[in-house]
Image (cartoon, helix red, strand yellow):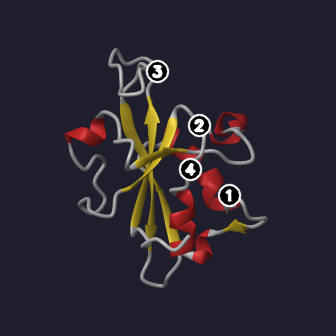
Amino acid sequence: MDQQAPAVVGLYFRSSGAARVCSSGAAGAWRRIAEFRLAPDGHATFRAVDPIEGLVARVWYHQGVDIQGEDRTVLPRDGAEFLRALLQPFGFRDYRFRDDSGCAPRATNCSPAARTAPSPADAHPIRNRRSPRQHTAYR
């Protein structure tokens, strides 16, 4: 994990009811539902952009992110390492993390492209120990 640390990582959700077809061939439009941001004190912060769907990101914020190929978990207190860990290539179909460091502060969507599908180079599907759908307490 030697790459440059992002300052902002957005979590995107693919809406199943949308009529669009994204580059992977699956129906649905991508929308930003949460963000993780590097704070001045070096810790990562969390903000739900969507008050319902965005709460799924709270799971990663509280439980941390497993580093692929290593037997460890990074937490928000690990700051930049936590944000880099969110950008690992995972495996969820309907959720994706994207480095949004170049976006305007607190923007819901950075550009028209962010309202559809994050590009394959920017967006990585996510995976964690449990599916976010299993965490009904946040719904």
Whether residue 52 can be seen here: no
Crowding at label 4, few (<14), some or many (≥20) Cα neighbours within 10 Å? many
Q: Secondary structure at mark 1?
A: loop
Q: Report how far apart the C-alphas of labels 4 and 3 lie in the structure.
A: 18 Å
- Going by the numbered disc 1, the residue's amino acid type is Gln
Going 68% across and 48% down the picture, which residue do you hit?
128
> Which x, y percent locates residue 109?
28, 46
Q: Quadrant of the N terminus?
A: bottom right
Q: Secondary structure at mark 4?
A: helix
Q: Which residue is mark 2?
A: 92
Q: Judging from the image, what secondary structure is the residue with disc 3 in?
A: loop
Q: Which mark is residue 16?
A: 3
Task: Give the residue type at disc 3.
Answer: Ser
Disc number placed over residue 43 in the picture, else none = none
Name the foreground residue: 24 vs 60: 24
Q: Nearer the viewer, mark 1 or mark 3?
A: 1
86 lies above or below 31: below
Label 2 is placed on what type of residue? Answer: Phe
Identity, as a three-letter code, of the amino acid under mark 4 = Ala
Q: Which corner quadrant holds the C terminus?
A: top right
Please tell me which of labels 1 and 3 falls first in the chain: 3
Name the residue that disc number 4 marks: 57
Q: Residue at x 55, y 55 (%)?
A: 88
User: How many neighbours does mark 3 have within 10 angstroms: few (below 14), some (14-19), or many (20 or more)?
Assistant: few
Give coordinates of residue 120: x percent, y percent.
39, 42
Earlier sequence position, callout 2 versus callout 1: 1
Mark 4 or mark 3, earlier in chain? 3
Quarter of the image where one finds residue 12: top left
Q: Report, in whole angstroms, how far the alpha carbon at label 2 lies from the one at label 1.
A: 15 Å
- Work out whether residue 20 can be spotted: yes
Q: Residue at x 65, y 39 (%)?
A: 132
Q: Mark 1 — residue?
A: 68
